[in-house]
Amino acid sequence: MGAGRDVSHNAIGADSTVIDNRQTHIHLATHEVSWPLQIGTVPSLATAFQPRDSLRNEVNAARARGSAAVLTQVLSGGGGVGKSQLAAAYAAEALHDGTDLVLWATAVEVQQVIALYAQAAVLVSAPGAMGDDPEVDARALLTWLATTGRRWLVVLDDIADPAGMSGWWPASRIGTGWVLATTRLHDASLTGSGRRRVHVDVYTPEEADAYLRTRLSDDAEHLIDDAVGDLTAALGHLPLALGHAAAYMLNQDLTCAEYLAKFSDHTRSLEQLLPETADAEGYGRQITTTLLLSLDAAQQVEPAGLARPALELAALLDPAGHPLSVWKTPAVLSYLTEHMSLPPDDGRAQDAVTAEQAGAVLRVLHRYALINSDRRKENRAVRMHALTARAARQGTLASTPPHLGRAAADALLQLWPAPDQPHPDLAAALRSNADHLHQHTGDALWLPHSHPVLQQAGKSLADAGLSSAAVEYWRKLAVASHRIHGDNHRETLLVRVNLTTALYEARRTAEALSLLQDVLRDQERVLETGHPDITNARANLAAFYQQAGRHHEAIPIQEKILAERETTLGSQHLLTLLIQSNLAASYGQAGRTAEAIPFQKAVIAGRERSLGRTHPETLTARNNLAMFYGQVGRLYEAINLIKKVLADRIEVLGSQHPHTISTRTTLALFYSRTGQFHEAIPLQESVLADQEKDLVSRHPHTLATRNNLAVSYWKVGRTKEAIALAEKVLRDYEQSLGAQHPNTLNARKNLEGYRK
């Protein structure tokens, strides 16, 4: 019997134990909650924190548009832009205002969020929170948040796994709480279900300036100087970089100008200039780590293995943006194919990268906030913060710039249209990207030979009418070629020839002549007799003589070169046509216009065959023929031809291109010479408006146009307007040329005639 009771007791006892345990959970002791509650650590605000009013207004507007059920704003932006700081400011305000619950959760991993939710559920005595199952407790908190009448704010800081957060977003059914999240990601899953994205970018220039001044004035106002604005711009107005830089300046007692000089030295690494020891605000990461934190994750996302080589290539280009079509060029696709880095255990064959895959990896980099890719920007579609680009270059490119630099240069060249004047925005973007590429690749684009993109960028400047910029560009290249190749190298000589051409096109004829004569002597000393470079330089020399009015010296050279080129290259070669065109111009200057006209017609025919009817060089040839017609009195033929040239130049070059403006001036001149002043006036007014916008008021071209317009006004009876304009012309001539200059005397005579 006793044994039986023991057995029975043991069986019943086991069941009783289970019941007792359940009863223990049901009867958990409750506690009195002491409101308000802060759960999690809210970061301290940075010294000299900027309120960022415009950004806060955007957050508040997004919050105001939310429904009562879901009030969630997602602050999205790259590393170091101040997302967490902005969220911390809202959290601090909520605590100050007595909000019942402020919960700050680090959300890099979803389990971190769940654990903090579970802790909070117990602390607020959420119904159903047992204390032994984090997920159960976390869901109990979400239920409590949805229905409580207490005011609450939940901050989810640095979300890295949007998919994992599904089901863990708090909501308030009665509108007493709201959620603020921060993330680097531009991920569609972060929006929807009432969540609204607010893009957080760098400080505005004004905010960056205020931050640095305030930060330095607290401890060392003597470090503030006139370079503040330049320094904040160099740092890309990035809050994290500004904080590190200010601490470094304070530690080293450097003024803004002194620090800017160090920062502008690209041989110095970001680790030296923005060291971890300068993390005075407790961000917890070195700046290059912060900027490139997402790169390893992006490298694993499909198309896997392309994120790093794509970022490295983008880092060599203009941070302000490059065309999306760069990523469709054979050069880029070949580079990505060669440098794709698949995981060692990936069994897939490494096929050639397609344009679709290249576009996809840009979206991956955009999603991870390493670049910004916006196809609506067209020629500046792919942008990257300058410090992110610098971190990528310094962190990964130590051994690969020559190969990578030439791949990027090939891509730009493959994309460059010929001619590029019909596409001024694209041409400008390609020039700036070529310039940044040159800066970031050292001598890689010069060895073993200079890359053609360097010449193309200089030619593009000249074709765009940016003659002064072209002069400085070729002067810079001449210095580089001299350093790399020496004075007697053929490439150095060619760069110097291009510099003389730029000087010539900038109307600095005396300088161009002097330099070209020096270069020609060096070519004749270094190169073999009859070398094409020497012939080309002599052709340029003749053109310079022509512009200087020394046509009698130009003509014999041009005639000799024309005969040589017809023999060696043929009559239809573009170089033959070029010298023929220059010879025709010299004939025209020398009063031999009847001989010039057939030459010019032959040039037009040849260029139309080779280049097309509306190619800029063909249009120049047609323009010159119209000028010859004008010289020999065939004015109506000249007008008909120049009208067609004007229409084509507007279509090809745009209405504001210098060649287009010059053509309008020529047409107005022909109208005036045929007495068609009513037709001339609108053209002259248009030209004058353009010149006054782009040139100084007393520029000779502006004064000439103003004088011609006054004549036209007088001719059609608009005497008051003629007098007012003529008075201004006279004053400008007197101040710029003097009272006795022929132009001044002529202006005075015209004014007297108008007043009679």
Image (cartoon, grey):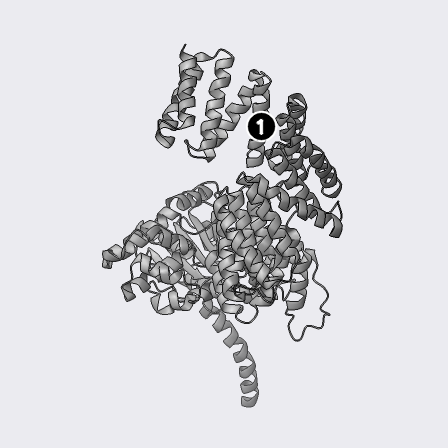
Residue 725 to residue 210: above or below: above
Relative to 510, 336 lies left or right: right
Q: Amino acid at mark 1?
A: Thr
> Looking at the picture, does residue 574 appear above or below residue 678?
below
Q: Nearer the viewer, residue 569 or 325?
A: 569
Residue occupying image coordinates x 56% and y 67%:
401
Expressed as whole percent of the image width and height from the top left, the position of residue 408 reads 60, 59
Quarter holding the N terminus is bottom right
> Which residue position is annotated with label 1?
666
Residue 149: % across, % down? 40, 48
For the point 32% across and 60% down, the residue is 258
Tell me where residue 749 appears, x and y as whole percent: 41, 18
Residue 698 occupies which quadrant of the picture?
Answer: top left
Of residue 583 and residue 668, the one placed in the foreground of this image is: 583
Depth check: give the residue in front, 269 or 594: 594
Front-most of 451 and 230? 451
Q: Which image quarter is the C terminus in?
A: top left
Residue 209 seen: yes
Image vertical order of residue 2 relative to residue 188, above or below: below
Q: Residue at x 49, y 67 (%)?
A: 394
